[in-house]
Amino acid sequence: MNYITLIIIGVLEIVTIHSIAQFIGTKRKIGYGKSVFWSIVLTPIIGLIITLSSKKIETQ
């Protein structure tokens, strides 16, 4: 693999992480920012587990 392929894969992974974090994180108390942070700092799977373990926002 050359460097261009690795960069493209990395950018696609970051975009995917942000999309999943935005979709799930906005409906939970953890929020979008923290879910993206944990997905980038840790692996996306652990970030997803942290986001899903957060309580949902109660709507009235």
Image (tube, rainbow, N blue to C red):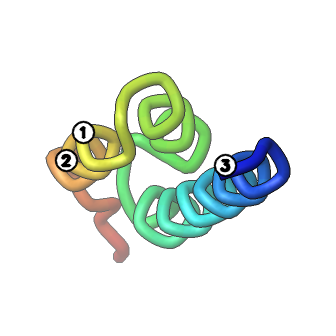
In this view, the residue in front, 43 or 59, is 43
Quarter of the image where the C terminus is located? bottom left
Give the amino acid type for the residue marked by disc 2 in the picture.
Ile
Q: Which mark is residue 49?
A: 2
Residue 12 in the image, given as x and y percentages of width and height: 68, 63
In this view, the residue in front, 18 or 30, is 18
Name the residue: 54% across, 56% down.
17
Report how far apart the C-alphas of labels 1 and 3 lie in the structure.
18 Å
Give the residue at mark 1: 46
Circles 1 and 3: CB distance less than 8 Å? no
User: Label 3: few (<14), some or many (≥20) within 10 Å?
Assistant: few
Give the amino acid type for the residue marked by disc 3 in the picture.
Gly
Q: Nearer the viewer, mark 1 or mark 3?
A: 3
Give the residue at mark 3: 10
Name the residue: 60% across, 68% down.
19
Callout count: 3
